[in-house]
């Protein structure tokens, strides 16, 4: 990988573009379809909704990008993988779900309650939390997602720390498994149809990767 294609920390001036990229990447994600089955509403709300993850991680975690913001990886750092109340207020996380309407808000609460439970269950020790990973649809299929994750995967391996994520898209499983994540839970949200896979990545050595 040339120096020009190395992942770099997202800069303040790139934030607006990062929100647009994540909005496009998640427009038809199963989780967003679960929250907003209506296409028009989902198209309107998705950039702002997933943008909160970018903004929160930018302020309190790490956000990595590549090239001309062709993709974004949003991480929460060990010891701070549960969003703080102050951080949620600052980023609009508490009020944004209400824009999906009462039914969408209820689905969101059900999902959050469930993911918080499995997160604590399977990643109780200090770990890195991949809260969001998105690549502009125009640049998908080029290996950018793996490149975007690599700086933090390297940090985690160097410190012998776990990495954890949840995905609601079964198509993502082979990609994450290729990078060392293993499925530790596969369930549907209570009272809902959304399926969630929790994945954990143990620290790896160079020997493990060969």
Image: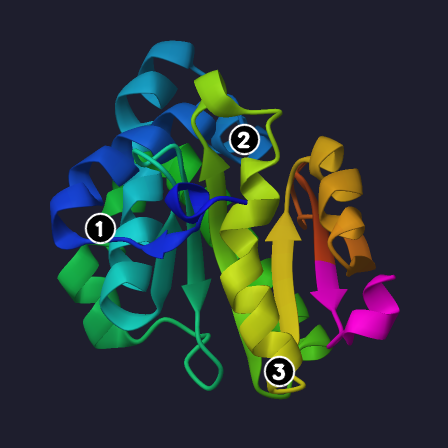
**Residue 171 at x, y = what percent?**
73, 31
Q: Residue furthest top?
A: 40
Q: Residue at x 46, y 53 (%)?
A: 109
| Quadrant in the rendering for residue 116 | bottom right
Label whose residue precedes the other's in the sequence (2 or 3) = 2
Q: Residue furthest front?
A: 2
Helix or strand or loop: what does disc 3 sit on?
helix
188 or 70: which is nearer to us?
70
Helix or strand or loop: what does disc 1 sit on?
loop
**Residue 48 at x, y = what percent?**
25, 36
Distance from Cα at disc 2 to Cα at disc 1: 18 Å
Q: Residue at x 48, y 57 (%)?
A: 131
Helix or strand or loop: what does disc 2 sit on?
helix
Task: Report crowding for label 2: few under 14, some 14 to 19, many 20 or more residues within 10 A (C-alpha).
Answer: many
Task: Report crowding for label 3: few under 14, some 14 to 19, many 20 or more residues within 10 A (C-alpha).
Answer: few
Tags 2 and 1 in contact by the CB under 8 Å rule? no
1 within the magenta span: no
Q: Quadrant of the C terminus?
A: bottom right
Q: Quadrant of the N terminus?
A: top right
Q: What range of the chain is rendered magenta?
A: 199-210
| Quadrant in the rendering for residue 203 | bottom right
Q: Which residue is mark 1?
A: 95
Report the number of numbered marks: 3
Q: Which mark is residue 34?
A: 2
Residue 145 shows in this picture: yes
Distance from Cα at disc 2 to Cα at disc 3: 37 Å
Q: Which mark is residue 158?
A: 3
Q: Which mark is residue 108?
A: none
Task: Report crowding for label 1: few under 14, some 14 to 19, many 20 or more residues within 10 A (C-alpha).
Answer: few
Distance from Cα at disc 3 to Cα at disc 1: 38 Å
């Amino acid at each position: 990988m040339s120096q020009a294609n190395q992942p770099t920390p997202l800069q303040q001036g790139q934030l607006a573009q990062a929100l647009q990229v994540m909005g496009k990447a998640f427009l038809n994600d199963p989780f967003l379809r679960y929250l907003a089955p209506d296409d028009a509403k989902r198209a309107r709300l998705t950039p702002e909704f997933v943008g909160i993850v970018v903004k929160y991680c930018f302020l309190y975690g790490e956000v990595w990008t590549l090239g001309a913001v062709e993709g974004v990886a949003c991480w929460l750092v060990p010891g701070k993988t549960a969003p703080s109340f102050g951080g949620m207020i600052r980023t609009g996380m508490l009020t944004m779900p209400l824009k999906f309407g009462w039914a969408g808000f209820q689905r969101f609460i059900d999902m959050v309650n469930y993911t918080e439970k499995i997160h604590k269950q399977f990643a109780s020790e200090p770990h890195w939390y991949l809260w969001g990973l998105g690549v502009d649809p125009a640049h998908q299929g080029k290996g950018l997602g793996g490149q975007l994750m690599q700086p933090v995967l390297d940090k985690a391996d160097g410190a012998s720390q776990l990495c954890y994520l949840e995905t609601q898209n079964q198509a993502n499983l082979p990609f994450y498994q290729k990078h060392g994540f293993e499925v530790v839970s596969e369930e549907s949200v209570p009272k809902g149809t959304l399926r969630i896979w929790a994945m954990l990545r143990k620290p790896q050595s160079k020997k493990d990767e060969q």
